[in-house]
Image: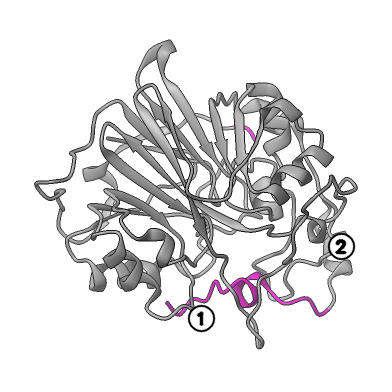
Amino acid sequence: MNKDKTESKRSNFMTRRGLLGASAAVGAGVAATAATAVGTASAGPSARPSADRSAPPGGLRLRWLGNNGWEIRIGAGDSAATVLIDPWLTRFWTGTYSEAGAAPETPIEVDTAVIDGYGLRADQILVTHGHYDHMTDVPHLAKTTGATVFGTESHVNTMRAMGAPERQLSVVAGGERLQYKGYSVQVVRSLHSMGGEHPRVAFAGTRPGQVPKAPETISDLVEGGSLSYLISVNGFDIVNFGSSNFSEHDLEGIRADLVMIQPGGANVPGYVPRLLELLGHPAYVVPTHWDDFDEPLDRPAVDWGGLDALRDAVRKASPKSRFVKLDHLETLSL
């Protein structure tokens, strides 16, 4: 979308930094750069999983697609499986992290040429929530990959309205465990961050019961319930959070060897230390959703302002955890 046109549409809508709780207080080039845990670590001493936890299994690659988009490759060669989380590659202009913020009437764009240019494969696509920067490209990727797509009833109904293949959509609510060859996926009920003068979820709402009209603007893509996901590869557990909040009750009994968390959580008491304690102080902490997604994906990520605070919080709360920051399209091999 034309930047000037978007600027003219902004009104008094709160910025993402305020409304989504992302407080600083706490294209073309598609080749990934190989990165090891040693090479990309930026804080704290190297941490090893405890004796009752699994070491990295080998043949596991995590590529950051910007925002909370992740490509997780399991295995090698043609037999490798691929799990995508919140893949959003179009990255149309929103102004979300600008002072004015994104206007609710910003039109939704799905650039199929850009999406197809990345040549993504997928066996499963995991949706954490229904906002524009998480779910917009999923219906097209479902068509091109044939993947099973997991999301809440609201997510699935909205994706039906966006033309996603009906037979590939799977409604989940949290608690489901699914076994695949060499790995498993567990769905975990979660919560979205809340921000603003009167804390609330941005673009809140649900789409139960029936398929809504096709969404046209970013305000039509409501949160629709939030989920997090545990991907276990030969006993090595990866947990992804799509927003800076979580449900403590639903994380009981879950431990992580690697966790993907985002900056923010200003209204969540003890956001980082409490989360890392619940997960058993993971060996690896990988920041996600820290880039200004109005900037190009084929260029270095631009921090919207919360990365340093997150790094410091992790260092204080879990000094043996290794903070591994990836840039756009970089890969962490384990």
Bounds of the magenta segment? 12-28
Mark 1 falls on what kind of element? loop
Mark 2 or mark 1, earlier in chain: 2
Mark 2 falls on what kind of element? loop
Query: Which residue is located at x 39 percent, y 73 percent?
Result: 309
Can you tell which quarter of the image residue 223 is in?
Answer: bottom right
Residue positioned most to the bottom: 197
Question: To which residue does mark 2 refer?
Answer: 105
Q: Is residue 174 magenta?
A: no
Residue 27 on image: x %, y %: 65, 35
SS majority, magenta: loop
Question: To which residue does mark 1 refer?
Answer: 267
Image disc number at residue 26: none
Query: Which residue is located at x 30 percent, y 56 percent?
Result: 253
Residue 164 on image: x %, y %: 76, 32
Q: Quadrant of the C terminus?
A: top left
- Check disc 1: other Cα within 10 Å, few if <14, some if 14-19, many if 20+: some
Q: What's the residue type where badge 1 is placed?
A: Asn
